[in-house]
Amino acid sequence: MSQPSTTLGYALFATRWLQAPLYFGLVAAQGVYVYKFFNELWNLILRCVTGQANETYVMLAVLKLVDVVMIANLLIMVIVGGYETFVSRIGLQGHRDQPEWLSHVNSNVLKVKLATAIVGISSVHLLQMFVDVHHTSQHALLWGTVIHMAFIASAAILAYMSGPMAEHGDRSHKGHGHASAHGQDGAGGGYSASTSVPAEFSASAAAVRAPAPAASTAPIPIPAQPTGSYLSSSESYDSYDPYETGAETRIRAARFPSRKQLEEFDEDHPRDFDREVLARLGKLDFVASRRNVVFVGPPGTGKTHLAVGLGVRACQAGHQVLFATAAQWAARLTEARAAGRLAEELAALDAHPLLIVDEVGYTPFDADTAHLFFQLVAHRYERSSLIVTGDRPLGRWDEIFGGAAPAMVDRLAHHAEIVRLEGDSYRMRRATSAWAE
């Protein structure tokens, strides 16, 4: 792109700040509603104290207060969500009062929430009419009901359309990535690394394909998961059920070895386990604040179960997640470096707010591979989240990564929740119990 075109584009994009005064104007309107609320409340209290308020008046006054609060809620949603979506990031990551919906807000979500809020406000107005039915004309009741039903129908249609439109956009994005990969690699290389779905080849297919040249931009696949994985290597992402939810698509794309839920975890099995930490992690605040989680403990104590459970919950919350063992990540990064595209690969992984690195420590790495892991951790430092599971504490990572360990641990642990699990292997306990029977 030429320099004048780039400058013009930046200038046009900067005009979004013209909307900022509009949102501050809505803040002033919010102040008007605060005044109106307390004015109505004061009048209600005075009339109740002086005995001038009957039951109907109290109910109507309370409904007016509820009406004001609901409109104020609508204003907050428009101010915060609209500013975040159309003007600039607010930077609430890590704030304990960050709204749950704000982490994955978009124009579709905002429109649906506004429509439902308007339906709620209309419901309160209609209820006020029916409470004060003796002073409301039939004409007003009829049109109030018709208008309310129109709001309900509009909200239902908007909610229905927003789902298929979003899924159509996702499928179009995936299809474009697939077509681009085929256009770049005559051997049919799979999805582009810039998409949210990693490519993966079966051994039989890879055997009959011509090898890509060293400078190829073909995507680097994560090696196939072991037999029994949640999505086998023979399954194609093109075979997704078009009616499945976006959460299910993200869960399948994450490549979990099996599907686990946090609620299924046997909290009584580990001898030393902080349940409050798990409850806190389950809220996924660490993803929004770009923090890390490290599960440390002997084999069979539930580290992978917890990592997958958090990953599944993150997918359900709208986040893109990618799971692989440490050995598989090593293979992916090594191939990217060999192809001369390590920087592009690390940048492509930014599309996933959460990466899971499982089984760190089971296999030591050479100096070159350890440096690749350092680059992965350093690239995501304060940018995105990692969940790491391993069999030894961070102080012993020099046994795995050698000289790269101190700098890697420094970045990984700086913003991290370290969860220690102690106990015997759950798998061995079940095997011993079965043998005893």
Image: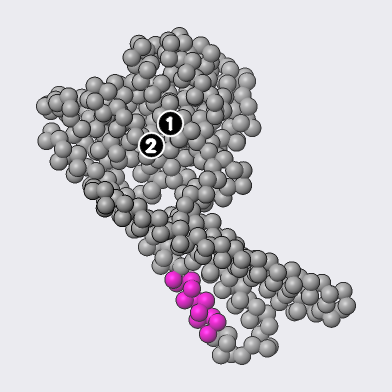
Q: Which residue is mark 2?
A: 350
Can residue 408 be seen here? yes
Is the stretch drawn in magenta largely helix, strand or loop?
helix
Decide if residue 51 is on the left or right side of residue 105: right
Vertical placement of 431 versus 54: above or below? Answer: above
Q: Residue at x 61, y 31 (%)?
A: 277
Q: Give, as a three-letter code, the residue at label 1.
A: Arg
Can residue 110 be seen here? no
Q: Nearer the viewer, residue 336 or 274?
A: 336
SS type, badge 2: helix
Q: Residue at x 60, y 36 (%)?
A: 280
Q: Which residue is mark 1?
A: 380
Q: Nearer the viewer, residue 228 or 192?
A: 192
Q: CA distance from mark 1 to mark 2?
A: 8 Å
Residue 84 in the image, given as x and y percentages of width and height: 48, 53
Decide if residue 403 is on the left or right side of residue 75: left
Q: Give, as a three-letter code, the residue at label 2.
A: Asp
Q: Which residues are magenta?
A: 143-154
- Mark 1 vs mark 2: which is more N-terminal? 2
Q: Are marks 1 and 2 in contact (CB under 8 Å)?
A: yes
Q: Residue at x 13, y 33 (%)?
A: 187
Residue 353 in the image, given as x and y percentages of width and height: 43, 38
